[in-house]
Image: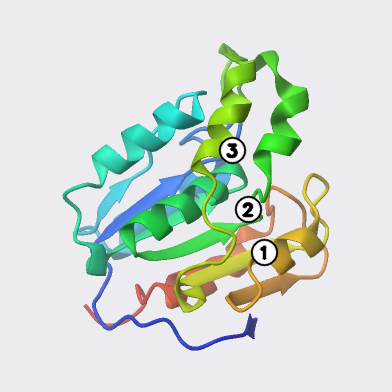
Amino acid sequence: MSAAGAAPARVEPVTHLLYLHGFRSSPQSTKAKKLAAWVAANRPGLVWWCPQLPASPAQAMRDVIAGVAAWPRAHMAVIGSSLGGFYATAVAEQRGCRAVVLNPAIDPARDLAAAVGETTAWHSDDRFVFRAEYVDELRAIAPPATLTDPGRYLAVIAKGDEVLSWREMSARYAGCHVRLIEGSDHALSDFDAHLPEVIAFLGLDRAR
């Protein structure tokens, strides 16, 4: 891992953990299920929340922010994959919490403009409509270009990502803690190899 920037200012243990899935994904994604299983086996007292996000970015953010409103900022963290990484960054900037982003979307308003229309989810037969106005909603919730505290972020980025540019991701999270992977893919099919670093960054591997 390239650990540019200062260590994150965190002395308190994480007691609340939010996971945000990507576009067309769900809580049934492989990474979400692996993290849920790890939490259940190793931190059963941790508050774990992995919601099914609505297609509307504005509604997704409203739901998430409302859901974590009572969570203690110093004790919470958010993990997000792809579009969920974009959302996770917005949440972390609003809440001042730690964040892990996995092959995060950098400019989803640009990238998803071509996805307007009816599409399908990855983990079910459900169909949904990604509306043109959702592109504007993505622009409206975009986190600031300069992150408040880069030390609070770990970005796991695969050079083999076939969907997003690893160079663009690396530039966006420059100054953050970055794990730059040779190869792999957008889904991080080798997530088992990187899970220990995610856990360690959040301090979840420390003695209870």
Residue at the farthest bottom position: 6
Residue 76 location (% of width, % of height):
29, 62
Relative to 182, does residue 46 appear above or below in the rendering?
Answer: above
| Quadrant holding the C terminus | bottom left
- Tell me which numbered mark, 3 or 1, is placed earlier along the sequence: 3
Instruction: Quickly name the residue at label 2.
Output: 104
Label 3 or label 1, whichever lies nearer to me, is 3
Instruction: Quickly name the residue at label 3.
Output: 139
Residue at 46% across, 36% down: 27
Residue at 33% across, 33% down: 63
120 sits to left or right of 20: right
Instruction: Quickly name the residue at label 1.
Output: 172
Judged from the image, the secondary structure of the residue bearing numbered disc 1 is: helix
Label 2 or label 1, whichever lies nearer to me, is 1
- Tell me which numbered mark, 3 or 2, is placed earlier along the sequence: 2
Relative to 21, does residue 194 appear above or below in the rendering?
Answer: below
- Tell me which numbered mark, 2 or 1, is placed earlier along the sequence: 2
| Quadrant holding the N terminus | bottom right
Relative to 164, does residue 131 appear above or below in the rendering?
Answer: above
User: For mark 1, does the 10 Å Cα neighbourhood hold few (<14), some (14 to 19), or many (20 or more) residues?
Assistant: some
Q: Amino acid at mark 2?
A: Pro
Q: CA distance from mark 3 to mark 1?
A: 16 Å
Q: In front: 182, or 3?
A: 3
* Quarter of the view holding residue 123: top right
User: For mark 2, does the 10 Å Cα neighbourhood hold few (<14), some (14 to 19), or many (20 or more) residues?
Assistant: many
Residue at 61% across, 79% down: 175
Q: Amino acid at mark 3?
A: Arg
Q: In front: 49, or 144?
A: 144
Residue at 69% across, 52% down: 189
Q: Amino acid at mark 1?
A: Arg
Count all numbered tags in the image, as a single digit: 3
